Amino acid sequence: MSEETDKKIETWLSDSHGRGYRIKRYLKGYFYNKVPRDLRFFGLFHWLVKTAMAASSPAVAYFYGSIQASIATMAFAGIFIGHSFAGVLDRLSRDKTSGQSEIQAEMMVRLGDLLSGVKGNAVAQAGRDDAIRACLGIIENYVRLVTRSKKGEVSVSLVLFDGNSATKMKIRHRNPGNERPTNRDVHGPNLIGWHACQRGREPRVLHDLREMPKRVRASPTQSKVGYRSLFFVPVIRARDGSEVVRGFVSIDCQRPYAFYGNRADVIMVTCEPVFSRINDLV
């Protein structure tokens, strides 16, 4: 791996970015999480064209000499502002809970899947894989709720070291409904999550994959990378009185800065029992 790639990864792991980058990161986080998606470039352009068309009557009247320029200008401005205000009210009046109720309903289904596989303090070996996938599904649904993402925009995967190898890893499981391949052997150093595991057991967030070198941006199972944000949670196993990183849970989202601010902390606190259950099952 090149020196530039190593430097980029080290800067990310140690969060030793300069003030300029931190300001840019704040602005990007605000843009991707606070500015409504339908008010970004194409949405804003569509809104401007639609509003201008709605307010074009005074301009047409001025063109045919029916009214003076000053009157046409004031009328255009009044209609433009009024139409914009009505659009904002319409957007605010939309039901924002329908998507959340869908997520919550599916989350309950995943909880049922998990609980049905748990018998006392142990899970039969044959049911462990189903229980792990159920856990990943619970995490996926809660992450969608926190990040306000749609179905298919969030993916949750379990990646483990293969045996005692320090570099060979395998994608063991994905959340239910996820069609991306599993049981693929991957070279650890080519994965961002592998580098996070080398640093320790702390969860780590990568706000935008495109900010990293191309060497570690490639997907291990896809020809085209569709995700931008990544959140890595190490999987820990107790061995001989110490804790060993066995792999990691990878949560990715198609939107950049999806885990910005306190979202990653909220996910960790709320889903801590689920992550702990995955550790036990592994």
Image: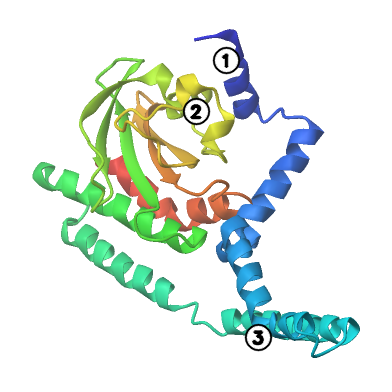
Residue type, label 1: Asp
Residue type, label 3: Ala
Q: Residue furthest front?
A: 64
Of marks 3 and 2, which one's residue comes earlier in the chain?
A: 3
Q: Residue furthest bottom?
A: 66
Of marks 1 and 3, which one's residue comes earlier in the chain?
A: 1
Of marks 2 and 1, which one's residue comes earlier in the chain?
A: 1
For disc 1, the marked residue is 6
- Identify the image quadrant of the C terminus: top left
Q: Is residue 39 visible?
A: no
Q: Is residue 190 left or right of residue 76?
A: left
Looking at the rendered image, the disc whose residue lies closer to the viewer, 3 or 2, is 3
Mark 2 residue element: helix
Residue visible at 39% across and 51% down? 154
Looking at the rendered image, the disc whose residue lies closer to the viewer, 2 or 1, is 1
In which quarter of the view is residue 193 placed?
A: top left
Q: Position of residue 259 (x, y in %)?
A: 55, 49
Who is closer to the viewer here, 66 or 229?
66
Q: Residue furthest right?
A: 70
Who is closer to the viewer here, 124 or 39?
39
In which quarter of the view is residue 64 placed?
A: bottom right
Residue visible at 22% across and 35% down? 182
For disc 3, the marked residue is 86
Tell me: residue 139, above or below residue 23: below
Q: Is residue 104 left or right of residue 179?
A: right
What distance separates the C-alpha of mark 1 from that of mark 3?
52 Å
Residue visible at 16% across and 56% down? 117
Answer few, some or many: residues within 10 Å of disc 3's Cα (few below 14, many 20 plus, some between 14 and 19). few
Q: How many marks?
A: 3
